[in-house]
């Protein structure tokens, strides 16, 4: 099962196997997941717990659970239990003890119910028949592939040729199931894109699929592209917020009740929320922080922010139909946006494309150029030194005495991000180091540094780059090219190469 499907089951599985959000009978769910956690022989396995609303366990729960592990003195195993056949027919029940049993369930039912509560499947099915529309979906051999086939092919009638690598494999076919420009290279090439996300000038855009998308290993993240056009996660989220009328889940409520993004994501969402007067939250990275906001009324008796839209920098997007990010939901949201934009377009006429939608958004709000540099496998001591130096020299120090440079990019200030949860009051600190810059044009820019993992295999330093550009004549630049001067200045002042020995990132996304 995909991660969002698990959340749907927890939220919606009533005694008859169906239900609506929040009406499930489960107290929670233990999730065994290939979700880039450093466990198991291949360091790609983790055990997670989702609470009764289907959301990832919060810090209060995980801290209490950890405390209990310190008091364990013994454990019991189940002797002579039945051999459970996971391929048995739906409804098969295995009685393990007088009070416990295992039942084989349909993995699709509750998740389909959740998606159908968000989108007009009949309308999407008709749009899929338009002679100008075609799509390709890359499941990356992850858990989401089976769900993509069920939804896109069996429910919406798209041809099976629309699917790439949608057969789940234990080793992901030897690939890395991360839906970005580097690891989804087959999809990137099919969409007429170069590795940096810019259009391949040698490809005829009219011969390319209208919409391209990819899932990750557990089906909760997404990549979205049009013909010769890559959509950054931050732009994707902002466009969904701006075009809420295209998404039935939001349209029938008259708009959004709240939006949120992770701190490293770009501020493209913020300007849309401000224009619409919608509450906008900036949280640490981690879906559990969105879960609190989505369940503010249900779990805490607080303000209802629904319908809710949220997303994070690592290609995660979702809403409050479940309490996890949902890659397939994001794909259907884009299909809905395209369907609405083309409702007056007849067969034979040119469709409004993904590129048209994104460029018109930039015309309206300006463009937030954005990309991420990952320095993987950095010596842990060196990685920590980079972060400690930024903290001491810039966050706790004085940014004024920096030597002059020819870039015209000026460091304004530096802060370390912390967060007080508006729902439960919990506090989270040390969530990233932010360097705020001013460009020669006077427009703002920022660079965020975060550290991921500091084990014996090394650490990953992530550097997030963002700058705002209101001049539409510059909107067509590729993000890495537009951000090159900012990146060079940030790397110079933090002495990345001197400290780590790395003269370039491992991955740019």
Image (tube, rainbow, N blue to C red):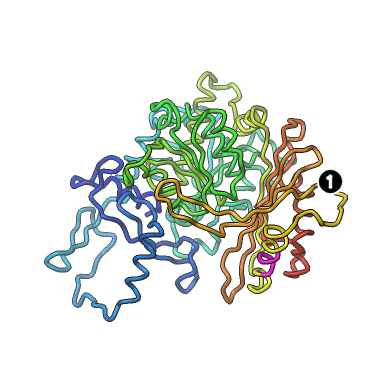
Our reading of the magenta stretch's main secondary structure is helix
Q: Judge whether residue 276 can be spotted in this image.
A: yes
Looking at the image, how many numbered discs can be counted on the residues?
1
Residue at x-position 31% and y-position 41% = 21
Instruction: Name the residue tied to disc 1.
Output: 408
Instruction: Please tell me which residue is depicted at 74% across the width and 64% down the height of the picture.
Output: 496
Picture coordinates of residue 102, whole percent (x, y):
21, 61
- Does 89 appear above or below 346? below
Q: Quadrant of the N terminus?
A: bottom left
The image position of residue 303, as x and y in percent, is 38, 38
What x and y, as percent, mark residue 405?
A: 86, 52
**Residue furthest to the bottom:** 73
Q: Which residues are magenta?
A: 385-389
Q: What is the secondary structure assignment of the residue under circle 1?
A: loop
Q: Residue 32: say if magenta.
A: no
- Report which quarter residue 308 is drawn in: top left
Q: Position of residue 447 (x, y in %)?
A: 68, 51
The crowding category of the residue bearing disc 1, from other C-alpha atoms within 10 Å (few below 14, some 14 to 19, many at least 20), is some
The residue at 60%/30% (across/down) is 357
Position of residue 336 relative to residue 492, above or below, is above
* Res 214 visible: no
Q: Residue at x 70, y 65 (%)?
A: 389
Tell whether 500 sits left or right of 181: right
Compare residues 484 and 180 and report the one nearer the observer. 484
- In the shown orientation, is residue 292 left or right of residue 273? left
Viewer-proximal residue among 130 and 229: 229
Pick the residue in front: 53 or 293. Answer: 293
């Amino acid at each position: 099962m995909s991660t969002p499907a698990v959340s749907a089951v927890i939220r919606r599985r009533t005694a008859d196997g169906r239900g609506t959000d929040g009406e499930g009978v489960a107290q929670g769910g233990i999730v065994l997941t290939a979700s880039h956690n450093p466990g198991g022989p291949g360091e790609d396995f983790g055990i997670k717990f989702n609470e009764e609303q289907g959301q990832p366990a919060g810090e209060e729960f995980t801290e209490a659970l950890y405390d209990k592990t310190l008091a364990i003195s013994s454990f019991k195993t189940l002797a002579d239990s039945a051999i459970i056949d996971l391929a048995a027919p739906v409804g098969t029940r295995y009685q393990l003890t007088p009070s416990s049993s295992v039942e084989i369930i349909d993995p699709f039912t509750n998740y389909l119910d959740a998606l159908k509560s968000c989108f007009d499947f009949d309308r999407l099915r008709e749009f899929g028949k338009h002679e100008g529309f075609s799509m390709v979906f890359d499941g990356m051999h992850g858990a989401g592939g089976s769900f993509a086939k069920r939804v896109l092919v069996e429910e919406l009638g798209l041809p099976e040729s629309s699917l790439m690598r949608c057969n789940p494999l234990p080793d992901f076919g030897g690939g890395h199931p991360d839906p970005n420009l580097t690891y989804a290279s087959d999809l990137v090439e099919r969409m007429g894109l170069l590795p940096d996300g810019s259009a391949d000038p040698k490809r005829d855009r009219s011969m390319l699929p209208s919409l391209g998308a990819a899932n990750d290993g557990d089906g909760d993240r997404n990549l979205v592209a049009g013909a010769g056009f890559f959509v950054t996660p931050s732009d994707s989220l902002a466009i969904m917020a701006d075009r809420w009328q295209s998404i039935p889940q939001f349209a029938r409520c008259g708009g959004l009740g709240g939006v949120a993004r992770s701190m490293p994501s770009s501020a493209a969402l913020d300007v849309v929320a401000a224009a619409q007067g919608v509450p906008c939250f900036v949280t640490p990275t981690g879906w559990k922080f969105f879960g609190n906001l989505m369940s503010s009324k249900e779990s805490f008796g607080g303000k209802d922010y629904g319908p809710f839209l949220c997303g994070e920098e690592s290609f995660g997007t979702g809403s409050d139909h479940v309490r996890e990010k949902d890659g397939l939901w994001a794909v259907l949201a884009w299909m809905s946006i395209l369907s609405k934009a083309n409702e007056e377009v007849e067969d034979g006429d040119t469709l409004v494309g993904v590129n048209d939608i994104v460029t018109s958004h930039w015309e309206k709000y300006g463009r937030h150029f954005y990309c991420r540099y990952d320095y993987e496998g950095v010596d842990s001591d060196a990685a920590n030194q980079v972060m400690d130096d930024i903290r001491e020299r810039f966050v706790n120090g004085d940014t004024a005495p920096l030597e002059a440079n020819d870039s015209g990019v000026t460091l304004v200030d530096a802060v370390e991000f912390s967060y007080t949860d508006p729902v439960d009051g919990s506090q989270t600190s040390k969530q990233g180091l932010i360097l705020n810059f001013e460009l020669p044009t006077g427009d703002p820019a920022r660079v965020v540094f975060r550290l991921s993992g500091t084990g014996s295999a090394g650490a990953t330093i992530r550097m997030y780059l963002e700058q705002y550009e209101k001049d539409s004549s510059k909107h067509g630049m590729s993000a890495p090219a537009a951000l090159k001067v900012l990146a060079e200045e940030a790397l110079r002042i933090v002495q990345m190469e001197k400290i780590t020995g790395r003269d370039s990132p491992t991955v740019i996304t």
